Amino acid sequence: MRQGAIVAGLDLGSTKTCAVIAEASGDRKTPRAKILGVGISRSSGVRRGVVRDIEETTNSIVEAMRDAELMAGVKIGSVYCGIAGDHVRASSSEGVAAVRVSEITRADVSRAHEPALAISQGNDRELLHHIPQGYKVDAQDGINDPVGMTGLRLEVDMYLITVQSTAAQNLRRAVERAGFRVGNMVLESLAAESAVLTDEEKELGCVLVEVGGGSTDIAVFKDGKVRHLSTIPYAGLHVTSDIVQAFGVTQADAETLKKEWGYAYLPLVSSDQMVVLPGTPGQGAREAKRELLVHVIQERLDEIFQVVTQKISESEFSGRLPAGVILTGGVAHTPGIVELAREVFAMPVRVGTPSQRINGLVESVNAPQYAVSVGLALHAARAQADALSGSNGLGRTFGLVKRWLQDFF
């Protein structure tokens, strides 16, 4: 793909809005993004993936995009927007088609997809992604790409991801009120995996755990595909609330304590270190052992990871994920979180920061909180590659196939 296509990713979280502007290159198999600008703003308008305050959300988008545009020196018209939350649903569907000639073509694959996509999702659901999990040719399974093979009957196992229609509509409305168009919506877990997971990890089997502000999203990958999705309603804001209750401080002061003194693993903290607590004139100066603060943080994160472990065990891939756990989201930046996670999951653990197929101002996004926004820019780069491939002489044919195979095929 030629250089010069400008794309943007917008991550609307429960505590912050992140915007990334990039120059797209590469092709749809290996899209690349040169980071040009980054913007971040505080936000409280979204909770667990659902807009609760349109005006607050709009204002945070305006602020984050303004900063990103100033850094990049460009103006943006459309953005790729992330979506997540416990309203996300995943299900499997099957499709079948008779092969018209002995050799299977892309057209045969498209016809096999049609019945898999024809299932009604209901008036309150919107289809977000359709991802082929595998194919069968004359009952022989385990096939990733059947094109060029010989057979009479082609079957597909499709993974359908849907979201609540009103949740998607309100996200679009907030973005549009901020002066931008939504080019597409992408599940945040799938956006993050584009930025932080290696092909080897996805092939071997791994779990992406995005610990955000309002919820924790879990995505299991195996044989190069997403295989299981789940969300739990516990995340960083719950850690903050625990600190508020334990020390009698405000929400803002609890956030400060968490960021400046917080650790996720008690054995890494000195037993004699003290923390000065914010107070009012009536309270006077107060101190507390840092161990107590870390204990509060560790207990909540341990609980979150225990629930994640339970969700993983509910999938058929428990015990089959040798690449381990990759942590993203703002909470993944907490010191000691890898040590705690290794103890809970009994698997390899690393923190995922954007590193796949990016260049430019890489240091500006070198933190797990940018995984989704960078991944969204990469998805937009893939779409740009699709648009260019559709502009040549075979554009109409490839354009039809693209609609069926747009997700990770």
Image: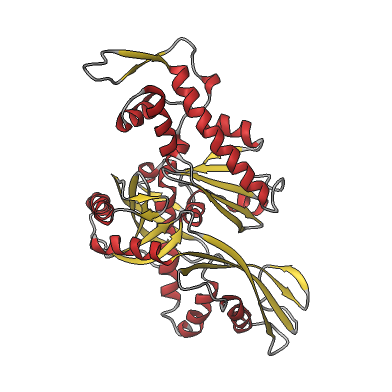
Q: Is residue 377 above or below residue 261?
A: below
Q: Is residue 155 left or right of residue 116?
A: right
Residue 5 seen by the camera:
no
Residue 376 sits in which quadrant?
bottom left
Q: Quadrant of the C terminus?
A: bottom right
352 or 259, nearer to the observer: 259
Q: Residue at x 27, y 56 (%)?
A: 54
- Where in the figure is residue 306, as x and y percent of width and height? 60, 38
29 or 137, nearer to the observer: 137
Q: Residue at x 44, y 48 (%)?
A: 371
User: Please, which residue is most extreme toward the right here?
Assistant: 139
268 or 150, nearer to the observer: 268
- Where in the figure is residue 235, as x and y percent of width and height? 46, 41
- Where in the figure is residue 154, as x and y percent of width and height? 70, 79
- Where in the figure is residue 64, as x and y percent of width and height? 27, 50
Residue 391 seen by the camera:
yes
Q: Is residue 275 left or right of residue 280?
A: right
Q: Residue at x 60, y 77 (%)?
A: 113
Q: Quadrant of the N terminus?
A: bottom left
Residue 259 sits in which quadrant?
top left
Q: Is residue 232 left or right of residue 140?
A: left
270 or 21, nearer to the observer: 270
Q: Is residue 105 above or below residue 3?
A: below
Q: Is residue 301 above or below residue 94?
A: above
User: Please, which residue is most extreme toward the top here?
Assistant: 272
